[in-house]
Image: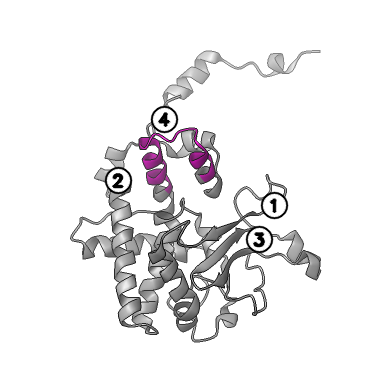
């Protein structure tokens, strides 16, 4: 009886020809020429500029819609790049706020299958992707639904302590402002009406599938214009490439910090090499 290799003979020459015709990945120079790349330090400067503008607005005009919008944008920039490894948009879109221990815990906002939520048992009730406010400027972050949840046997990432020791005093000030008056103001004074989503759109509703992915490039372009820089269109995918490029330039390959960053991004080091590191050669 013929074996599989005899049934389906493969030509090594054919495979080599196909491999030679696979387009080479673009490099930073090509992305920059297309207006889709900035260096990590420059992107950190852009998000830092947004953060300082939001802080100034929150301190000068608290409880105003203008300040609330800037504060939310700065919180998005901080969680998408400045203070964390770039979270995937789905993680941020489904993030809900537990404003205090005295308040009922919000329901899981995951829009995919959730075994715990479907069990309808209080002891198994899914906590979802949850930012919990423990006190003034002290939070914990728990991610139940993330890219690797199936691989992890549905185990969550976290909880991670988010305070001025783990991030910065300025960023926790913005999280506090958004949690206590910014987000409630943006959703018309009733966070429960929108399921306590931490990030909401201009209508005060939870972001749709593509809304958040479109919002981030726009706010980057806006800040670059504010700073007198040439605009660049920076998507969530490009954020991850820029972050990995900066990590590799810093010489942290193989470190605990690199492994932890890859984990929070929903990746492995091998996937960083294969997908995001533009300088990696097999």
- How far is mark 1 from mark 3, CA to CA? 16 Å
Cα distance in 3D space between marks 2 and 3: 35 Å
Real-space CA distance between mark 4 and mark 2, rounded to the nearest whole angstrom: 17 Å
Mark 2 lies on residue: 39
Give the structural element (helix, strand or loop) at label 2.
loop
**Residue at image mark 1:** 155
In the picture, measured across the screen, residue 167 lies left or right of residue 100, that is left
Look at the numbered disc 4 and give the secondary structure of its residue.
Answer: loop
Of callouts 2 and 3, which one flags the residue occurring earlier in the amino acid sequence? 2
| Residue 214 appears in the rendering | no
Numbered disc in front, either 2 or 3? 2
Label whose residue precedes the other's in the sequence (4 or 1): 1
Residue 203 in the image, given as x and y percentages of width and height: 45, 79
Name which of mark 1 and mark 3 comes first in the sequence.
3
Q: Mark 4 or mark 2, which has the lower sequence index? A: 2
Q: Position of residue 98 (x, y in %)?
A: 60, 73
**Is 253 one of the magenta-colored residues?**
yes
């Amino acid at each position: 009886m013929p074996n599989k290799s005899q049934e389906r003979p493969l030509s090594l020459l054919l495979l080599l020809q196909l491999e030679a015709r696979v387009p080479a990945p673009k490099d930073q120079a090509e992305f920059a020429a297309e207006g889709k790349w900035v260096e990590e330090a420059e992107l950190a400067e852009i998000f830092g500029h947004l953060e300082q503008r939001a802080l100034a607005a929150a301190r000068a005009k608290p409880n105003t819609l203008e300040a609330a919008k800037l504060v939310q944008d700065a919180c998005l920039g901080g969680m998408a790049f400045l203070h964390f490894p770039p979270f995937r948009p789905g993680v941020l879109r489904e993030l809900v706020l537990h404003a205090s221990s005295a308040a009922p815990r919000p329901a899981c906002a995951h829009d995919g299958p959730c075994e715990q939520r479907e069990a309808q048992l209080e002891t198994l009730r899914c906590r979802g992707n949850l930012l919990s406010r423990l006190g003034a400027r002290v939070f914990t972050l728990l991610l139940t639904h993330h890219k690797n949840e199936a691989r992890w046997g549905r185990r969550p990432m976290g909880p991670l302590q988010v305070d001025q020791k783990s991030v910065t005093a300025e960023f926790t000030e913005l999280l506090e402002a958004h949690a206590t008056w910014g987000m409630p103001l943006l959703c018309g004074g009733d966070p429960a009406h929108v399921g306590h989503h931490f990030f909401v759109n201009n209508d005060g509703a939870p972001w749709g599938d593509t809304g958040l992915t479109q919002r981030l490039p726009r706010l980057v372009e806006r800040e670059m214009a504010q700073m007198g820089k040439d605009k660049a269109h920076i998507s969530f995918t490009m954020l991850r490439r820029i972050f990995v490029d900066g990590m590799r330039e810093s010489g942290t390959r193989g470190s605990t910090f690199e492994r932890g960053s890859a984990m929070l991004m929903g990746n492995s080091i091998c996937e960083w090499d294969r997908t995001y590191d533009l300088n990696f050669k097999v």
